[in-house]
Image (cartoon, rainbow, N blue to C red):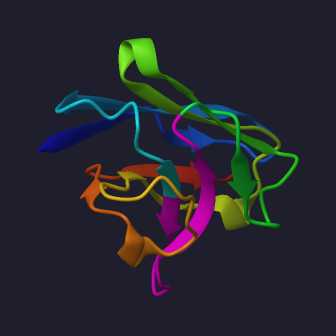
Amino acid sequence: QVQLVQSGGGLVQPGGSLRLACAASGRTFTINPMGWFRQAPGKEREFVAAISWNGGTTDYDASVKGRFTISRDNAKNMGYLQMNSLKPEDTAIYYCALRRLSSLLSRYADDYDYWGQGTQVTVSS
């Protein structure tokens, strides 16, 4: 079993930056792809970014590409989402997630087995 605990997030002005962190405990997560998703009020959960087990491959939704950076530090069992040039439409609850049985990246929430508790990101002036 893997537990994911998120930190970071909060209120930021448009154009600002935030970094989300995701700490994994329990069984090792070093071989699992990690993803970040978000859910805005009244909307479905949507894909933000994903990273392979060794960080060598990443994938981003078009809406965040060039502004967000996903990374991980397997030695520390940590995952990160650096968010720059934030926009009001980035406002949502953000979730980190891990896949259990596959090494492939995925944009589908149903493919992920472990989830963080979620953290609110609000972009507003």
Quarter of the picture holding the N terminus: top left
Find the residue positioned furthest to the top.
75
The boundaries of the magenta stretch are 37-53
Q: Could you say where residue 118 lies in the image, as x and y percent from the top left?
A: 34, 53
In the picture, measured across the screen, residue 23 lies left or right of residue 53, that is left
**In the rendered image of this protein, does residue 42 appear above or below residue 13?**
below
Which residue is at a point 17% across and 33% down the rendered structure image? 27
In the picture, measured across the screen, residue 40 lies left or right of residue 3, that is right
Q: Nearer the viewer, residue 123 or 32?
A: 32
Q: Could you say where residue 93 lies in the image, as x and y percent from the top left?
A: 44, 60
Number of labels in the image equals 0
Which residue is at a point 41% across and 25% down the rendered structure image? 78
In the picture, measured across the screen, residue 70 lies left or right of residue 23, that is right
Find the residue positioned furthest to the right.
66
Q: Nearer the viewer, residue 37 or 84?
A: 37
Which residue is at a point 41% across and 37% down the rendered structure image? 31
Q: Nearer the viewer, residue 20 or 30?
A: 30
Which image quadrant for residue 24?
A: top left
Q: Could you say where residue 8 lies in the image, as x and y percent from the top left?
A: 45, 32
Q: Could you say where residue 53 lies in the image, as x and y percent from the top left?
A: 51, 38
**In the rendered image of this protein, does residue 56 appear above or below residue 122?**
above
Q: Is residue 54 magenta?
A: no
Q: Is residue 50 magenta?
A: yes
